[in-house]
Image (spheres, grey):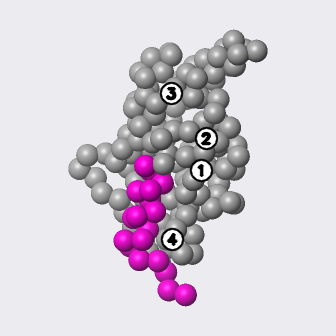
Amino acid sequence: MSPPSRDQLLKTANLFLEAFNEFTPESVVRHRSPACLHRLLPDTLKSPPQTNADHANFIRALRPIMPVFKLQIVEGTEPIVDDVSRKVVLHLKSHSSTVVGLYENEYVWTLTLSQDGTSVDDVAEFADSLYTADWLPKLKKAAEEAAAKKQ
């Protein structure tokens, strides 16, 4: 079997981003393979890899405090595609109005796609570690408070 084309890999990466921007527990995993793992890096962020169920639950917990989350490719950059290894590298920025303030972060995501190029097998998300380390506790606390109010 020959590797998927560059066009197929880019199509899947774009579908993945569009679905992620819907920002629902179902949409963020829509274009992932059943065994896909989402890894937040670097390791200093101490975030374990997330299965599809883990990632959907993470988004479910964030939605009350972060109802809209948008990712976009950084202006002036283009995806890097390696069709042999089925990888697409994206330089991204995010934007979200949250209950604890404006959240804007920067990332490099490396997507490894399936053999046929139609789903994502792995997400390696390199985040701005200083910004992320500052924000994760704020978001976790706000999510816990929102969950407690529901009970």
- The span picked out in magenta is 1-18
Q: Which of the numbered marks, if any, corresponds to residue 25?
A: 2
Q: Which of the numbered marks, if any, corresponds to residue 117?
A: 4
Which residue, as the protein is rendered here, is positioned at the far right?
Answer: 151
Question: In the rendered image, which residue does mark 3 sit on?
Answer: 67
Foreground: disc 2 or disc 4: 2
Above or below for 18 versus 113: above
Q: Is residue 44 visible?
A: no
Q: Secondary structure at mark 4?
A: loop
Q: Earlier in the sequence, mark 3 or mark 2?
A: 2
Q: Secondary structure at mark 3?
A: loop
Q: Earlier in the sequence, mark 4 or mark 1?
A: 1
Q: CA distance from mark 4 to mark 1?
A: 16 Å
Q: CA distance from mark 3 to mark 4?
A: 30 Å
Q: Nearer the viewer, residue 104 or 119?
A: 119
Which residue, as the protein is rendered here, is positioned at the far left?
Answer: 76
Question: In the rendered image, which residue does mark 1 sit on?
Answer: 29
Residue that appears at 64% across and 16% down: 146
Label 3 packing within 10 angstroms: few (<14), some (14-19), many (20+): some
Q: CA distance from mark 1 to mark 3?
A: 17 Å
Q: CA distance from mark 3 to mark 2?
A: 11 Å
Q: Please state if 67 lies on the left or on the right of 72 as rendered.
A: right
Q: Are marks 4 and 1 in contact (CB under 8 Å)?
A: no
Q: Position of residue 76 (x, y in %)?
A: 23, 50
Q: Earlier in the sequence, mark 2 or mark 4?
A: 2
Mark 3: which amino acid?
Answer: Pro
Q: Earlier in the sequence, mark 3 or mark 4?
A: 3
Q: Are marks 3 and 4 in contact (CB under 8 Å)?
A: no
Mark 1: which amino acid?
Answer: Val
Above or below for 149 versus 88: above
